[in-house]
Amino acid sequence: MAQKNQLERQLTDRRKFQKAYGTAARREDTALWIARAMGLEPVNGHDITAVYNYSDWSSIKTENLPYIEAVLQKGIMKGTSATAFSPRGNISRGEMASIMNMVADQSLDKLGYKTGYGRVTAVSMARDIGAVSDTYTTSITIETPDSEVVSINVRKTSTRSSTSQESVPVIKNRKIGNESLISQGDIVEYTIDGENRAVLLHTAELKEIDGTFVYYDPKQNTVQVGDSSNNMYILKVMPDSAITVQKEPVDIGRLEPNSPAKVVFANNILKSLSVDASPELVSGREVPVRIIYAQTSPVGNVIKVADEYNNMDYLDLADNAAIYINGQLRGADAIGFDQDAVVRIFNGKVHEVRIYSDTIGEDSDRQVILTARIREISDKGITLLTDDNPKNPVLYTIDRNTPIIKDKQNVSTSVLRQGDRVKIEVNSANDKHITRMEVQGTGVQIEKVYKGDIQDVVPETGEIVLSNVFTYGYYDWIKKEDNIKFKLSDGAGVYNGDTKLSLDRLRDYIGKSIYAVSKKNYGREELAKAVLKDGAESTLYKNIYDVKWTTKQLTLSDGRLLKFSDGSIVIRDGRLLDSMYIDEYTRAFLVQNRSALGVGSVPLISLDSFNGFNNYSITRGYLHNMGEDYYTVENPFRLENNEWVESEELTFLMSSETFIYDNVVEKEPISVEKFAESRFKPYTYTWPNYKTAGKKMDFHEDDEYHYDYRRRRNDSKFHQHILMYVVSDGEGNTIAAYLMKKDKNCYNPDVVYKERYIAGQVNEIDEGNNKVTLKNARDFSPIYNEWIAIKAEVPLETGKVVILKEGRAITIDELQPDDYVYVLSDDDYSIFMIVED
């Protein structure tokens, strides 16, 4: 009986299997079979994620979930829609074909086979010299789109009695043969085993489209083309890719984007590209120029160039512009300063730049090139603001072996200044050591800014005579002599907007008004640059919101649009600079002209100055560290056009000429030597709170008692630091320092400073009572952002004030009536009085 029951069960199971063979496969079963056939590891626990993307996952048997998850993660199968896997649905023929194709590819990889494609660059047959029998080797060389070389060798040996022949199956033009079908230039798909032996070669079918050449990417050496249905293809350009215009060969970099074209390719390898355009239009216009600098940014790249007559212009670089330096393809960030080049222009943009430099080039694959401005120079290194991330300061190191190039000469680090524009090279994106630096000149130190009428021009001596001359003071133009003769310095330019005028041409503008900036040349004052006045004048203190280089347009914080030109006089830290130093989000003092047509332009721009066009910088902050000839200021703010702007920690240099007033300990001026001794015990000036925190300690630690104001301010150990004001030149040299008071507010976010800015003329000087009275005084209003006239005379206490004139401290008896002065004071007394030179 038992045997009968067992036989019936076997027959029943066989009928079930026979019935199953005749039914369609379900998707869940198919996935399970594939996972087991490929030996996929089941995915368990929290790693199961893909299957939960489908709302019907709960319909899958629990024991099958790990296997179906593995199939989904491998990309072998996917759902019937974005939200359904349909485990009980039937598998279609199309789905099965796609699945088997994926299985085949992944099975080959699992078995150690490698697949790929490329262009056959060489086919040769050679006899093996020295072999006992006749042995010939057929060599096939394939170059992949990644420039890798795949070599396939097939040997054939013949003797009198037998022939031993290796063979590679080849499919070409839908015919099956051996390696003899392969020809140079074929595009082939190959399969090779783990020992680099060919298993199969399949020549790809060429595809031809009539469409559009979109653009060429020189960095990737690829072209993008589109067909009539707007399908886009990225194709690799190979050495034998035929590029023609009207059947004439042409350099692919000269093709104009978005041109009609006929394209032949296989896989993603370009065979030929024929553009339908006249050759003269394709070649563009080649212009020899001198590249002054390149401005790179995420929104586009611009180069400033000069022609043989030194006429300057801004040119847009096309997004795919090819930059060649000594024949090597580089990026726009590799363009240096003041380089001779040939640019090719069409449709108003530069598509090719060819630079020939005597400088030995670095390995472009190894070096990373960055352009930046110097934010700070310290014993730790150089802090830079890079063009691609200007709001994030980065510290780089530099050593004596690092070449620093300026004006095509090797210089030392002593020439570097805050604000210098530099191009650096580092070994990698993560490397912070500079291997090479190139510095752009930072302009000449200016003496004065003038306005006057052109009375005469003497080309023979290089001189111009101005009448009705004014120089700019602390809040307005100050009348000077009626007639002043100026010599133009070597290389000085006189501009009418963007046009540089010769002295002969300048004679045509006699009687016109002009703005000019002067410099000292061995004690003699000469004009370094001048620009013609163009309309009614007004002055502004505004933030620059945006800079458009190609249209030479500024957008100010109030939405006002103003034009600048090559003739615009740009000043920062008392130096005459190129217009490239006009930065976005920079506080600026501007002299505006408005023409009869209503067009606004800016002939004069002062950046980051404490007020107008002066040669000083004023900083407020807390004394931090100190060396023999330097000190640092923590949490500093710089006075930029009468507004305090936060900065990173600054380093200032001292010399024997530095004037220091101590209002904390001595209540009188002190020597630099006495101030510098503070770095030793008893730490008179640099120790935060010596009587409590400093006992039995040999160093000042920046711990929680230093910076955690909110939690530790009432603790006896909480640091007290000296608040100080510093007047420095544009190179960080201290002219005068004022040690104001010692308090705990270095890290107090709520502290309010109540400085006042007054400018006017000295009326009376009372030396006995240390008082000075100002007339024609004006008070700067932060609310209205302008100088407001004060009707009454202004008395000033000068007992503790530091008076500066011509870069040095003077006493009250050296003041003269009618001197123009700028005074920085707080609620209690005056701090600095700066006399107009």
Image (tube, rainbow, N blue to C red):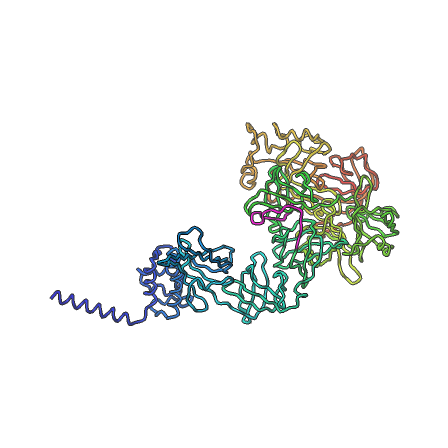
Magenta residues, start to end: 354-373
Left of 447 or right of it: where is 42?
Answer: left
The image quadrant of residue 235 is bottom right
Residue 801, compared with residue 534, is above or below; it is: above
Left of 178 or right of it: where is 385?
Answer: right
The percent position of residue 121, horizontal first and vertical second, equals 51, 59
Instruction: Please state which of residues 758 and 563 is positioned toward the viewer in this rendering.
Output: 563
Instruction: Please state which of residues 703 and 242 is positioned toward the viewer in this rendering.
Output: 242
Left of 28 or right of it: where is 252?
Answer: right
Q: Residue furthest left?
A: 1
Q: Is residue 232 visible?
A: yes
The percent position of residue 348, horizontal first and vertical second, equals 68, 62
Residue 386 drawn in magenta: no
Residue 502, compared with residue 666, is above or below; it is: below
Instruction: Please state which of residues 724 and 342 is positioned toward the viewer in this rendering.
Output: 342
Residue 484, compared with residue 221, is above or below; it is: above
Residue 154, compared with residue 694, is above or below; it is: below
**Residue at (27, 70) in percent of width and height:** 20
The percent position of residue 586, horizontal first and vertical second, equals 67, 50
